[in-house]
Image (cartoon, rainbow, N blue to C red):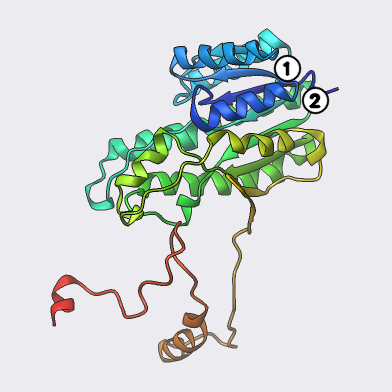
Amino acid sequence: MKILSRKIAIVTGGGRGIGRGHCLHLAKSGATVIVNDIDKEKSESVVEEIRSQGGKASPYSCDISSREGSENLIIGCADEHGSVDILVNNAGILRDRTFLKMTDEEFDDVWRVHVKGTFWCAQAACKIMKERNTGGSIINTTSGAHFGNFGQTNYSAAKGAIASMTYTLAIELARYGIRVNAIGPTGTTRMSETFNDSANANGTEVDFIDPTLNGPLVVFLSSEKSSSISGQIFGCGGDRLALMIHPHYGKTLTKEGGWTIEEIEKHLLEDLVPEFGPIGMLSIPYPFSKGVKSPDNKKA
């Protein structure tokens, strides 16, 4: 028996790229896959691809950037297939712009799809899992961009929010047998193509990475083989399998009675500055060691 036999899996943004890879691997492992994509033709294309390989799949084209669309997807799937066992929150968009030029609309569009879409879909799915006492697996999608990435205030903030959401949901939902993890996938897709034109690329063309290579980890995290894993975030895709360490306080100084400004200046600069690590998704060595100065001050 395949490891996901009789499981019902929903993948948002499943019509192309990384999401398509998730769908193909979930179906290959025995799951019935609901391929949701706002592009109906792409959703149907992936379903036909799965069926041609002997798998089971159904197309949906709900817009998860609203509560109504998210609930229509999850509840419609449960009504049609009898349950929801696996939810992969993969759908996403980009609206890249430098911070000072970014509009409310560009911020809200990204936040609504990534953060609210993840929240709405997960909430609807988990209510069904709890009501039916079946447990299940939620897999969210974050990104190394939440470490910081030029021109992506909206996207990096959204991905950081999803990481924090993952930790909290894992804590709250364990009592119902629901595991919540996240992946930071990589792969050459329409979204990644914007990187080559951005300041982050530094003139370097990024090699092709097969976006379907994230699928095996999604299958593993969806299965009972990962029953002891929740509240974790993994980097995947290409050749890598990485654990993202939970945010935590590093080196800590204490002083009875608190700190004066003069003491902070001395001990922060001497004891904590050497602890500063790389900044940003590309792990650029700490770039501000010589100070952050205005253009006028730089000329002086």
Q: Is residue 8 left or right of residue 188?
A: right
Q: Residue at x 74, y 37 (%)?
A: 220
Q: Is residue 293 above or below residue 63?
A: below
Q: Is residue 291 above or below residue 195?
A: below
Considering depth in this image, is 261 or 221 the residue closer to the camera? 221
Q: Residue at x 74, y 25 (%)?
A: 29
Query: Residue 129, percent across and down?
Result: 73, 25
Query: Residue 138, percent across and down?
Result: 66, 34
Q: Is residue 114 left or right of residue 179?
A: left
Task: Report the residue marked by disc 1.
Answer: 83
Q: Amino acid at mark 2?
A: Thr
* Mark 2 neighbour density, 10 Å: few (under 14) some (14–19) many (20 or more): some
- Disc 1 vs disc 2: Cβ atoms closer than 8 Å? yes
Query: Residue 97, percent across and down?
Result: 28, 45
Task: Report the residue marked by disc 2.
Answer: 134
Considering depth in this image, is 127 or 103 the residue closer to the camera? 103
Q: At numbered mark 1, what does the secondary structure look like: helix, strand or loop?
A: loop
